[in-house]
Structure formats: C-alpha cells, structure tokens
Image (cartoon, grey):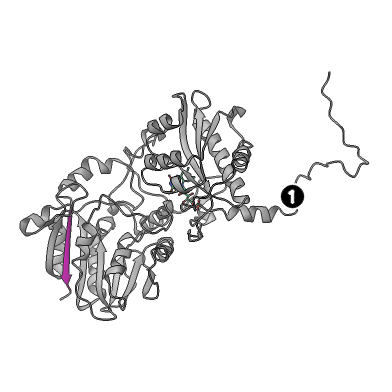
C-alpha cells in the first residue's frame, strides 16, 4: 500500500500551516530561551530521589538530539542505586555530588563508527545538553562531568563492554537550599565570535610553544608538548583572563579547592603572620579560589580589614560567594581588582601583605615586590611563600608536572629559594625565613638554617624598613 499523507485542506482553519520562514515558531520563544539561559551547574544536591518515570523522560528527551549519520551510537546508564552512586563518588575521586544527586546518567557510545572529528562524541554531547535543558525546565538541577575517574573501575561497576566508551556523567537532582545560586560567568559575546574570518582579542589567546602545527592528538591533559608554563611568557591580562574563567571549574562551596597535596603547609605559612594592630589593613594578592583567604580570614582578628587583590572580577565574585558558604562575615573584607602588576593601594597605607605561593604565577615577581614595598607602611610586614625550584618538588615539576597542560590556577614556574631570598633581602628586612616540606607533596616539615633553601616551599616574614 502506498504511503499516504493527509493533505491539509486549504480552507480548514485547523490545518497546521508551516511557519513563515522568518517568523517565530511560538510567540513565547524569547521567554523559553531566557529560561534555558538560566540553567547553571549544581554541585550541591539534597540527596532526594526523583521518580524513575521522570528520569526516563529526561533521558528520552536527550535522544531527540541530532547524531552523526543518525546512528545514535549512544547509550545512557541511569544510576539511581544509592550504593552505586557512593561507589561512583569514590571512583570519581571526591565529587560528593556523585553521591548526593538523585541519579547519574553515564554517557556512553559504541566504538567503531563516526569517530572522524569526534562526531560520535559530539553526538553524545548534544544529547547530554538536551537532557540538561529538559531537567532544567522540569525544575531540577544538573552538572555535567568529564571528571568521572577510573574508567576501568566504572566499566566493571556498570558492566560496560570494552566496545563501549564511557565519556562522562550527568548528575541530576534537587539543589540544597544553600547551593550557590550562580552561573559561571560567560565571556563577552564579542570576544568569542567573528564574521567571515577568525578574530579574537589578544588577551584571550594564550601562549603556546612556537610550532608550525598543533596536532590535536599530540596534546593531552598530562602531556602537552606546547604548554607554556613560564608566566614571564604570559601577560598579566592573559593570566587574569585564564584564571578568571577557570576558577569556575568548580562551585564556590565551602572546602573547595583545598589541596590534599598541600597538607599542613598552609598552617605553617600562616604561623609566620606578624602581630597586627587592631583594625589593621591586610592585603592578600591573587587569591584565585580563596582557599588561603578563608584560612587567613579565620586567623585574623575580626577587627582586621582584609583586602583581596585579584586580576579578575570573576575570581572575586567566586571568593565572595565562597566566603558566604564558609560562614564568614563579609563586612571587613574588600574585593579589589588590580591590573598589570600594580597594586590598587596608596603608598604606605597597608599593615601587611601576604603573597601565598603566587610570586611564581607572576610575569614580573620583582615588580610585585616593589609594589608591596610601596604600599606597606614603615614597619609593615610581608609574608611570602614560593614553590622552590631547588627542591624535590622543583625537580618533580620540571620532570613531570610541567609536561602536562597548564593548570586552572594559571601558569607557574617554581623559583630557586636563594633567588627569592635575595629579592626579599634587597627590599626588606627578613625577620624569619624557613623551608616547608622535604617531600614532593603532603609533608609540612619546617626546615631552618641552610636547609631552609631546600624545602618544597620557601617562606619568609619580612619587615618594611
Ligand atoms: C564537557 C563538560 C565537562 C565537564 N566536566 C566537569 C567536571 O568533571 N567536574 C565539574 O565539577 N564540572 C564539570 N563541568 C561543568 C563546567 O565546569 C560548567 O559547565 C562550567 O563551569 C559553566 O558553568 P555553568 O554550567 O554553571 O554554566 C563540565 C562541563 C562540560 C560541558
């Protein structure tokens, strides 16, 4: 029997007319787009279950996405079993939202077809975003994760055959009432599009080692032959731009970005803080995600005014929300922007400056030390710490770490402790200089005497004048 199609009668008012070429499909199209644009990632779910029928509808909505050659080589494993979610959390290496979400949707594809230009990956990505939008419209929150941990352990847990790849996981749930209500900042649209040819502001184009070609498959997270780690090859603007967006790789939650590798070293660094007068003015430079700032604020007397000087307004908004999440009072915290290495404070107006492992992130660390001297009052203090090139960590950095891509905190290059001590000595009176940590990471042994120059970190308290 030939296939027949019902022909809409021209006279029938109920016939579905095709939309005019330039006309909107629905009168509320703008509202719909606005609602979709409100979606933001959630990494703090309340742990409540979502009905399986609803979850299945969300995943089914995702399958309306286009796919390469229409092959739909995707497979979605919905994990709502609490024990499996906990195991998924362990495997992911510390994403508590894996355990607290209502369900994880593991995004998989069958290997062997449409690999060119990653079209099979592109297809699953389209479906995943469609699921996020479906969940969002239904009032749920989501977070997409490429960081899922050991894929072999996951394949075993989920009985995924070796011919299928696990690409990521979408967590769906209800946010805790306290979850940050914020969306990560977007680049100004003008920066990320151009007409008929490639154009992009210089500050958003980051250094790469000179080469004729940059073959994608030669560049991996843990092995990037083109990575430029030396901040002296970056401008202040590029560093601020890079750090300002990548800090949002996580949400501004309490305890975020605390490094286990750092161990107790932060506490030892903070022990160098001087006694400060009531109402003192303290500046921390380049706080990035605010890990050190939170500890610093807790150490300081409530009367002290803490200024956080950052390159990017996005980092400052991240740290501000993080302070809220950490239960810290904001009335004596100032969020200040600086550019091109110049601190935004008048001469001689600051009681103490802290530079916690940031000189090695700067294009011009000596200029920063000049700035610190300028803004400190006579008798004011600098507490600085630096990752030491002349240490077990320094060697690990040059042999292993620096072969990878530049981290989200931005480019960094450990500096020899003796050089830093020399810079400090040229400008200040060093009251105490120590080494921290004998190992590549974790330990916080305090090294004094000549050994101070061989620790993982070199840290000093200096007086101005
Ligand atoms: C492909 C992809 C992978 C991602 N992987 C992770 C991840 O492993 N962990 C995580 O916390 N967030 C992850 N995210 C979430 C992003 O950090 C987040 O989408 C981004 O910061 C923008 O924020 P928004 O979703 O609130 O707009 C991922 C997002 C995408 C698109």
387 relative to 6, above or below = below
Residue 69 place in picture, x, y as percent: 60, 27
Residue 162 in picture, x, y percent from top left: 44, 24
The quadrant the N terminus occupies is top right
Identified at 59% across, 41% down, the residue is 52
Location of residue 212 in the rendering, given as x and y in whole percent from the top left corner: 37, 36
Residue identified by numbered label 1? 24
Q: Measured from the top left, where is residue 286 in percent x and y?
A: 32, 62
Q: Is residue 148 visible?
A: no
Magenta residues span: 457-463
Choose top left, top right, bottom left or bottom right for residue 215: top left
Task: State the residue in front, 353 or 206.
Answer: 353
Q: Nearer the viewer, residue 361 or 452?
A: 452
Position of 456 compared to 161: left or right?
A: left
Please name the residue shown 17% across and 50% down the image.
389
Left/right placement of residue 332 relative to residue 399 reads right
């Amino acid at each position: 029997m030939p296939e027949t199609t019902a022909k809409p009668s021209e006279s029938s008012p109920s016939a579905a007319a095709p939309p005019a070429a330039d006309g909107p499909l629905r009168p509320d199209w703008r509202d719909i787009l606005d609602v979709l644009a409100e979606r933001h990632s959630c990494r703090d779910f309340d742990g409540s279950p979502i009905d399986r029928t609803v979850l299945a509808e969300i995943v089914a909505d995702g399958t309306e996405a286009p796919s390469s050659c229409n092959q739909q080589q995707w497979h979605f494993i919905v994990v709502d079993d609490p024990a499996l979610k906990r195991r998924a959390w362990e495997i992911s290496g510390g994403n508590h939202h894996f355990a607290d979400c209502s369900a994880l949707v593991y995004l998989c594809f069958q290997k062997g077809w449409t690999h060119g230009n990653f079209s099979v990956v592109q297809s699953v990505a389209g479906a995943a975003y469609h699921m996020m939008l479906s969940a969002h419209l239904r009032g749920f929150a989501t977070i997409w994760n490429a960081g899922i941990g050991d894929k072999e352990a996951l394949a075993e847990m989920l009985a995924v055959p070796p011919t299928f790849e696990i690409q990521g996981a979408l967590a769906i749930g209800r946010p805790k009432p306290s979850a940050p209500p914020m969306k990560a900042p977007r680049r100004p649209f003008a920066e990320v599009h151009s007409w008929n040819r490639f154009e992009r502001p210089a500050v958003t184009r980051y250094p790469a080692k000179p080469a004729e070609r940059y073959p994608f498959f030669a560049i991996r997270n843990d092995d990037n032959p083109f990575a430029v780690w030396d901040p002296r090859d970056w401008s202040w603007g590029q560093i601020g731009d890079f750090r300002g967006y990548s800090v949002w790789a996580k949400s501004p939650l309490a305890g975020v970005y605390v490094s286990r590798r750092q161990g107790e070293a932060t506490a030892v660094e903070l022990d160098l803080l001087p006694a400060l007068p009531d109402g003192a003015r303290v500046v921390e430079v380049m706080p990035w995600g605010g890990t050190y700032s939170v500890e610093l604020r807790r150490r300081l007397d409530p009367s002290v005014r803490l200024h956080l000087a950052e390159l990017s307004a996005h980092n400052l908004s991240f740290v501000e929300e993080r302070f809220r999440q950490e239960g810290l009072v904001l009335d004596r915290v100032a969020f200040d922007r600086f550019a091109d290495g110049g601190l935004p404070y008048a001469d001689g107006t600051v009681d103490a400056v802290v530079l916690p492992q940031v000189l090695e992130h700067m294009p011009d660390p000596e200029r920063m030390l000049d700035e610190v001297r300028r803004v400190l009052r006579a008798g004011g203090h600098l507490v600085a710490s630096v990752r030491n090139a002349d240490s077990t960590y320094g060697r690990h950095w040059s042999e292993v770490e620096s072969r990878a891509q530049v981290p989200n905190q931005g480019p960094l290059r450990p500096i020899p402790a003796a050089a830093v001590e020399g810079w400090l000595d040229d400008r200040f009176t060093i009251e105490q200089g120590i080494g921290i940590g004998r190992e590549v990471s974790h330990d916080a042994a305090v090294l004094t005497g000549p050994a101070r120059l061989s620790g993982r970190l070199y840290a000093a308290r200096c007086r101005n004048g």
